[in-house]
Amino acid sequence: MLAVQITKFGGLECIVVQESDVPVPGPGEILVKVSAAGVNPVDWKIREGHMKDMLAFAFPTTLGSELAGTVVALGEGVTDLAPGDRVHGSTGALGAFAEFAVIARNAIAKIPDKLDFSEAAALPVGVLTATAAFKAGAVGRDTRLLIHAASGGVGTVAIQLAHALGAEVTALGSASNLDLLRSLGAHHAVDRTTSYETQIGDFDVVLDAFGPEAQARSWGLMRPGGILVSLVAPPDQGQAQAHGVRATMSFGVPESAALENADRLVEQGLLRPILHRTFPIAKAAEAIAEVEAGHVRGKNILLL
């Protein structure tokens, strides 16, 4: 099978598309014929070696953390699926950018009929990341929520999930994306290049998918006792204490329940994936480079 792999840590030149062995599903796993895979910031961070102390690497390593495709084989103990079922899910960090991938049964869900494979591949990481972050921040009805980097792959999903929960959502993004953010359910959409600190505030929860600069501008925007939930960089606990708020990191955990909940929202018309561009597997490096540059609105998708 063809797979998008790295043979060492480094730049885009380390990405190769080459033949690799088809994996075999173990107990509790399934083998999927991958039709589409979502590209995420974690892919270039893994390529550069930022995750080398968190993941077990044996080069060559296949990149990719979310996929959509068709079940072709079942591991021991998997009895509720059948070959031919359309599924999507998250591998956690590695293995999705290949013609075949093994994934845990408890990390996938059946794809709603109204989604094609590209659309289905755009959802798992955003859904799982936002779900975990909302649990950390206790986001619910009437929560005043600020989302940084709201037009990205996680942000576009987070807006819709928060809206479905009944939160009051303020979304920060580029001026050209503000109409999109409103269409997804943001009550307030604000240009991130402005002095927005003078326009907004009094938030219960800040979701940071941007980084330290966004965090530095967020401490004074929260109510006393509010919480900053970071997806990208450990927050400064000293600043949190000085402002009378809390701060934590959050990571998405592959789980079927969160995906199934999101798929119900898809069926109800309350959640839709936002696709930026699709790429053939041969142009995987280009797809990753676009995400690394930060100019993607929604999700880049690899077609396999």
Image: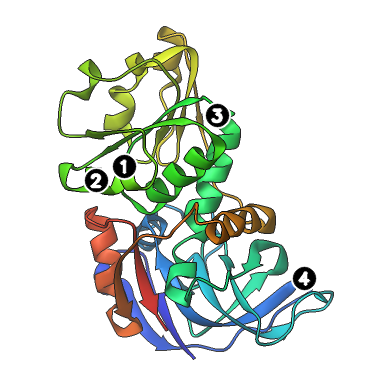
Q: Which residue is mark 4?
A: 28
Q: Secondary structure at mark 3?
A: helix
Q: Is residue 53 visible?
A: no
Residue 111 location, quadrant: bottom right
- Which amino acid, by three-letter code, is at mark 2? Asp
Q: Secondary structure at mark 2?
A: helix
Question: Is 144 above or below relative to 5?
Answer: above
Q: Which residue is mark 3?
A: 137
**Dot 2 and dot 3 residues touching (CB under 8 Å):** no
- Which amino acid, by three-letter code, is at mark 1? Arg
Looking at marks 3 and 1 on the same chain, the residue that comes earlier in the sequence is marked by 3
Looking at marks 4 and 2 on the same chain, the residue that comes earlier in the sequence is marked by 4
Question: Is 51 above or below relative to 74?
Answer: above
Towards the viewer: 32 or 141: 141
Q: Which residue is mark 1?
A: 182
Q: Secondary structure at mark 1?
A: helix
For the residues labelled 4 and 2, the Cα–Cα distance comes to 43 Å
Q: Which residue is mark 2?
A: 179
Q: For label 1, count other residues whose C-alpha is less than 10 Å away and answer few (under 14), some (14-19) or many (20+).
A: some
For the residues labelled 2 and 1, the Cα–Cα distance comes to 5 Å
Quick one: which residue is furthest to the front in this view? 268
Question: Is 152 above or below relative to 115?
Answer: above
User: What x and y, as percent, mark residue 168?
Assistant: 44, 29
Nearer the observer, disc 4 or disc 1? 1
- Which amino acid, by three-letter code, is at mark 3? Gly
Looking at marks 2 and 3 on the same chain, the residue that comes earlier in the sequence is marked by 3
**Dot 4 and dot 3 residues touching (CB under 8 Å):** no
Compared across the picture, whether 34 is left or right of 84 comes to left
For the residues labelled 4 and 3, the Cα–Cα distance comes to 31 Å
- Which amino acid, by three-letter code, is at mark 4? Gly
